[in-house]
Image (cartoon, grey):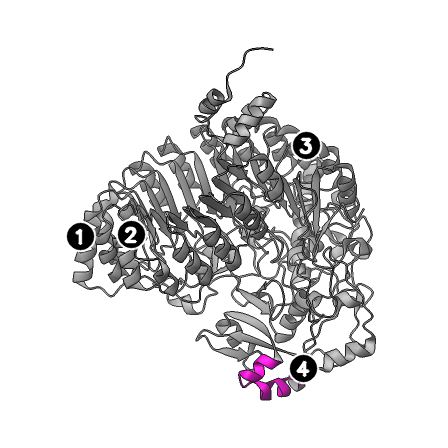
Amino acid sequence: MESSEKLTSDSEGSNGLNLKATELRLGLPGSESPERIDSVGGLDKNGYPLGVLKNLVSGAKRGFSDAIDGGSGKWVFSGSGGSETDLAKGGGLFSPRGGNGGGKHLGGSESNNQHSSLGTPAKNDVVPQSPKPMHEKKPQISAPAAKAQVVGWPPIRSFRKNSMASNLPKNDEDAEGKLGSGCLYVKVSMDGAPYLRKVDLKLYCTYLELSSALEKMFSCFTIGQCGSNGVPIRDGLSESRLMDLLHGSEYVLTYEDKDGDWMLVGDVPWEMFTDSCKRMRIMKSSEAIGLGMVFLSFLVPFLFKFFFFCDYYGINWPLFPPQIFPNHYEIWAWIEMPIDLDGS
Amino acid sequence: MAYSFPEEVLEHVFSFIHTDKDRNAISVVCKSWYEVERWSRRRIFIGNCYAVSPGIVIRRFPELRSVALKGKPHFADFNLVPEGWGGNVYPWIAAMAMAYPMLEELRLKRMVVTDESLELISRSFKNFKVLVLSSCEGFSTDGLAAIAANCRNLRELDLRESEVDDFSGHWLTHFPDSCTSLVSLNISCLASEVSFSALERLVGRCPSLRTLRLNRAVPLDRLPNLLRRAPQLVELGTGAYSAEHRPEVFSSLAGAFANCKELKSLSGFWDVVPDYLPAVYPACSGITSLNLSYATIQSPDLIKLVTQCQNLQRLWVLDYIEDGGLDALAASCKDLQELRVFPSEPYDMEGNVALTEQGLVSVSEGCPKLHSVLYFCRQMTNAALVSIAKNRPNMTRFRLCIIEPRTRDYQTLEPLDVGFGAIVEHCKELQRLSLSGLLTDRVFEYIGTHAKKLEMLSVAFAGDGDLGLHHVLSGCESLRKLEIRDCPFGDKALLANAAKLETMRSLWMSSCSVSFGACKLLGQKMPRLNVEVMDEGGRPDSRPESCSVEKLYIYRSVAGPRSDMPRFVWTMKTLS
């Protein structure tokens, strides 16, 4: 029956897509064309592989459907642009009626021919029907049992997750080495912004990825000031002014560690940072000076820069090719925030 | 003109009618009944704070004493709703401060409550008695200090599962010595230590205190003193349930529990050391509600405790209980009505405990009153679901979460359509259902055909196409809330059933295949629906209309589009 074949081919395809999408790639964070309808598989026009996480914040929530949905708008393989008949023709797909040896052990070679680049299931041979993990960028966790999580799944409240995370069972000696929980949400505040945001530090592997995500989150409070319905107000900021802002040093990114001390982000290795970070604050340099961080706030721009684009240019990060700002991937930038914020 | 009762008589009669449904029903009988009812209504529940405006509520019900409001969609609990989405209670407080100076009760769920709001509450309502903040956020202990200091007749302060900026435990000292009215205090979500002496004095001077839920920072050796000051307690949430093993702590604790003869509900039990559990045994025979969902103890210790509670009606527990523990539960606790089993390692693919579908089947066989289930597990079969359905036709809430999405029946490798179909077919009173596992459109056909009393349905990673959604929207007559994520549902079913959406409270769809064009169309055609599109990637109209939207939240409203949308939410009214 076609629907059942399509059903199995979905799970086949999902499995196949898993493998492709879990390949490590060196794309930029959030590199994916937002016009999913145009993405017909392979690479998008910037040369970034498709199905790769759109951006590690919002993309984490829609990346899954991107991965599965591709651009066709249907629940089919990414990039297949396919119809049900294509899937049925996928061939070699086992039937759900207990066919050949079990649904859990899917041979990768039997996947839809559009994914011929897929190899056999690599990581594990258990339950590959899982949906695409969100975080393709992340270096794969070595323990085969662990995998990247889908946002909001399983459906467990944050309060419970956080309680359990700090509640490693005492009678488990491996508790130290295990991932206590799959996510680590910390609050991020920005001086002057009307509301805080939260980021899951486990979604990122480097300061760079974190900076891009924070940039996206807070950009609307900065250059791209938005009206109440989200329309960016283009009030005549010129490109030269943008460059001035980028090279200015108005803001410092800090975090509160386990001891309650406020530290500058970027000093310690990433893992140490995620272990000890309780919350973050994008602090005005003037305050940082008061904390004795002025030296660092001058020094750090040479090491990191943090920059905001999106809303001003009305485009998303992935469409902003690296050639324009060639060496901004390793640096943070501080930019000026408009004084009067319309918080409504 | 027929003779009618004088208004005073009507009012007196109406004073015996309490439920919202009944009150709503009598208000539409005729104009005079409408008028009498609206002046005499004291209590209101607003399931979606954006469905109506404060002004409209105040105009219609001028004499309210108790208001309950819900804000964010349910999936906000799982981080699917970005911060800043909305649900700020301040406009409501500001309006009610003027209109209802005699307001006594405020119950908020999933709303953003600022310190400013709390301060305004504490200053505006002289007779304020009850504040329940369930899964709320946005406030700090400063706001709590204002409530403690200014609400002279405070009876209930319940912060269940809220996110509080916890600066220190000092706020508790703001309760004046003259405050003796507390009946319920729930601070279990707070992180910092509260001042123990202040807490002990507060507990000691409130003779009507029946509910005390402590936070994790209250150490076990402080508990006996607290319990001795409140032997009348009915509901207790412990703090951390561990200490170095010292005999005097144990005996003190055991004595204190033995002294609390009214105890019916226990919770807390963070960081449990099993050696101290026997201290609660004296209280177990009276216990009807036990929340061990933070207790990381293994099955044998759990069994010992649970089997002592012969009158248990509600059990929340981690999957450490395993099938063996559930068998023991089924054998001992014949009054059990609600069971929730949470995963101890939700992100571990392999599974760490011997908890399977069999445990749930045992409980469904052994506990005739079981009607509410939340169960996380890693495997399931259609046969098990059919057994559960046949065993428990009285089921009203059934939420099954198979941790791995799209998991098949592990014995037959089929989808779980038939199993869930049996649930909706046999359990005719089912009000709430959450699906998981591999599911095709067939399950939705079953649901649409049989689930006539279903009010809330949660769907994830299921279905084949629009037909599934169409079955649900066209078949489920009582449906009020539908939340869907990562399903291949698109435009057709949604547009074909647009009118149905006005009979529901809300519809949430995220990572589905609903196009922006369809959202716009829906927004245009249905003026009494707010169609909100959430997209953190930029304006949805900067992409082709056939592009799917990231998240969609549709709800009926008489207040029109809301004015407090953040930059990542667009209403389909202004964009069209």
Q: Residues within 10 Å of mark 4 (few under 14, many from 20)?
A: many
Question: What chain letter is assigned to the residue under label 1?
Answer: B
Q: Earlier in the sequence, mark 2 or mark 3?
A: 2
Please give the label number shown on residue B301. 2
Q: Which mark is residue A249?
A: 4
Name the residue type under label 3: Lys
Q: Residues within 10 Å of mark 2 (few under 14, many from 20)?
A: some
Tell me the element at label 3: helix
Q: Is any part of residue A108 visible from this angle?
A: no
Q: Give x and y (percent) for residue A303.
A: 65, 85
Tell me if label 1 and label 2 are in contact, CB under 8 Å. no
The chain carrying label 3 is: B
Compare residues B31 and B551 and report the one nearer the observer: B31
Mark pair 2, 3: CA separation? 50 Å
**Residue position for label 1:** B255
Q: Residues within 10 Å of mark 3 (few under 14, many from 20)?
A: some
Q: Secondary structure at mark 1?
A: helix
Vertical placement of A259 versus B19: above or below?
Answer: below
Residue B154 in sight from this viewpoint: yes
In the depicted view, which residue is nearer to us: B245 or A313? A313
Kind of residue at badge 2: Asp
Cα gap from disc 4 to disc 3, whole angstroms: 54 Å
- Which residue lies under the disc numbered 3? B500
Dividing the image into 4 quarters, which one contains the N terminus of chain A?
Answer: top right
Q: Is residue B390 magenta?
A: no
Tell me the subunit letter for badge 2. Answer: B
